[in-house]
Structures are given as C-alpha cells and as structure tokens.
Amino acid sequence: MLTDRPEPRKRLLRLRLNGRWREDAVAESELLVDYLRDVARLTGVKTGCDGGECGACAVLIDGEAMPACITLAVRCEGRSIETIEGLVEQGRPSRLQRAFHEKLGTQCGFCTPGMIVASEALLRKTPRPSDQEIRAALSGNICRCTGYVKIIESVRTAAEAAP
C-alpha cells in the first residue's frame, strides 16, 4: 500500500561555504552532510556513522569542528562553513594536509578529512598544542586503521611549521 507523503518543505539557504556566499533551495529536513555532498558537490566530507560519533563528516561551522551528519543544513543559515576542500591554500595543500601526507597520518584516508578539520579547529585556538590537547581535540574522530601515533605526530608537525 502506497501512502501519499507530502513533498518536504523547501526553503532558500544562504551560507558562506569555503569563503564564498551561495544560495540553494534545500529541504528543511536535509542534513548538512547531504547538502555538502549532493548539492555543493564537496565529497571530501564523508558519511560514516550517521550519528555524530565517528568524526568523518566533521566540518568547521563558524570555526568550530562539528559533525555534518547530525546538523540540519537550514541551521547553517548565514553561517560560515569550511570543509576539507576549503583548507587548501592558493591551490596547494595546507600545512596540516602536507603534514598528514609527509608523516603518514593517513592510512585508508576515510577519516582523514574529519581529522584534518578537527585539527585545524584546534590549531586556530591553540597554535602550539600539547599531545594531550591534540588527543582531546581528536577524541570525536575515529580511525579504524591506526593507533593514532602518526595522526598526533602529523598535527604536532603542522603546529611546529606554523609561522
């Protein structure tokens, strides 16, 4: 038996995405991760747990690392959203992206965008974090491939490379 379900209500969403303002019609129930991947075509944001527990979908919302899989896109009206793609500096990898590559902080790569985004939020607040502060900042990010040693080393290396 088919039920008649009404079309989801849509509204115009205006936000600053990776430094550029944009407007899109989005369903009121659309999650930020789906908006970023399906509408904005930013596929660096990964869908992992769908419950805000793994960190694969982490993005910066007004500078704070937040899970996009449990954030409604419409809640981002007028806000600044940064994804892994937005951290690139003049077409080159950021210091964190370079450090993750050079120090082997990436294994399969699935968690890496979220790890880098969460690390970026940390380094903006605490430019020279201790290993304990790095661990605390990444506590919402799960990597199933590593023991986190290379990830922490990557963040430390990026912090040391800061001007």
Image: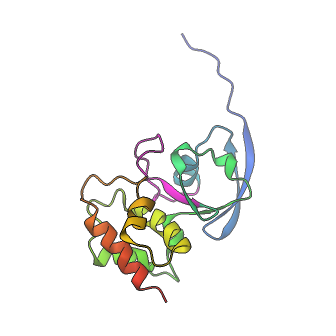
Question: What predominant SS class does the magenta segment belong to?
Answer: loop
**Residue 4's x, y, as percent?**
64, 17
Report the colour scheme.
Answer: rainbow
Determine whether, in the image, residue 56 is placed left or right of residue 71: left
Residue at left offset 28%, top offset 62%: 148
Residue at left offset 49%, top offset 56%: 58
**Residue 68's x, y, as percent?**
54, 50
**Residue 95's x, y, as percent?**
43, 80
Q: Is residue 26 above or below residue 97?
A: above
Q: Which residues are magenta?
A: 40-60
The quarter of the rendered structure image containing the N terminus is top right
Determine whether, in the image, residue 71 is placed left or right of residue 129: right
Residue 155 in view in this figure: yes
In the image, 128 versus 119, the foreground residue is: 128
Determine whether, in the image, residue 126 is placed left or right of residue 98: right
Q: In the rendered picture of this protein, how many numbered marks are placed on residues?
A: 0
The answer to which image quadrant residue 101 occupies is: bottom left
